[in-house]
Amino acid sequence: MFLERDLSHRRPGGSIEVIAGSMFSGKTEELIRRMRRAQFARQKVEIFKAKIDIRYSETEVVSHDENSIPSTPVDNSAAVLLLSGGCEVVGIDEAQFFDKGLVDVCVRLADQGVRVIIAGLDMDFKGKPFGPMPELMAVADYVTKVHAICMRCGSVAQFSHRLSDNEKQVMLGEKNDYEPLCRRCYNTK
């Protein structure tokens, strides 16, 4: 039998944790791991994803390794703030797809005592800072930079190379559309 507990002691101060890196570096996998640990600790959690991200599921955050966790798809950052009332831990996947208001939302949640865990691409396929990620990394209490393995030489990869000629900054894709590359291979592609 589950007993109702007083959890008011759990909010000493919030924090912002950013997990950043290239495609196929394990960002979502790490976000799911941290969120599951919070659930195991019986913390009230909610995970959000951009509504446009329907690659594997419309209502779950899914890693490339096919691990998943239920999520709430939202149109914008304001919805994260609106729907996270009472949460102790808020997760946000693919933060690069959100508007710049996400930075203020995350700071506000952290200031209210919420642990905010964010995963996203730090650079787009051109190697440029992507969406609100640079600002999120600047205001974060903790930043974890994860890396993939270069598909051409086996070195540590930090770039997401797009395999098509599509020039749109936002293009949802998977292994057929992107490959992780190290700096040397990215610059000689």
Image (cartoon, rainbow, N blue to C red):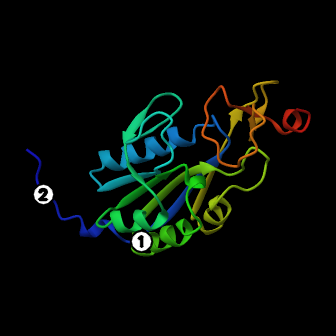
Residue 162 in view, yes or no: yes
- Towards the viewer: 179 or 162: 162
Q: Position of residue 142 (x, y in %)?
A: 58, 59
- The residue where tag 2 is placed is 4
Q: Which amino acid lies under the numbered mark 2 shown in the image of this protein?
A: Glu
Q: Position of residue 101 (x, y in %)?
A: 55, 69
Q: Position of residue 87 (x, y in %)?
A: 32, 62
Give the number of marks. 2
Q: Quadrant of residue 4?
A: bottom left
Kind of element beneath mark 1: loop
The structure residue drawn at horizontal position 63% and vertical position 34%, both measured from the top left corner, is 24
145 with respect to 182 (left or right)? left
- The residue where tag 1 is placed is 13
108, above or below 40, in the image: below
Q: Position of residue 100 (x, y in %)?
A: 59, 67
The structure residue drawn at horizontal position 68% and vertical position 30%, both measured from the top left corner, is 177
70 with respect to 141 (left or right)? left
Q: Residues within 10 Å of mark 2 (few under 14, many from 20)?
A: few
Q: Are marks 2 and 1 in contact (CB under 8 Å)?
A: no
- Towards the viewer: 72 or 137: 72
Kind of element beneath mark 2: loop
Q: Quadrant of residue 9?
A: bottom left
Q: Which of pointers 2 and 1 lies earlier in the amino acid sequence? A: 2
Residue 145 in view, yes or no: no
The structure residue drawn at horizontal position 55% and vertical position 58%, both measured from the top left corner, is 98
Which quadrant, please, contains the C terminus? top right
131 with respect to 13 (left or right)? right
Q: Which amino acid lies under the numbered mark 1 shown in the image of this protein?
A: Gly
- Towards the viewer: 186 or 37: 186
Which quadrant, please, contains the N terminus? top left
Q: Residues within 10 Å of mark 1 (few under 14, many from 20)?
A: few
Q: CA distance from mark 2 to mark 1?
A: 22 Å
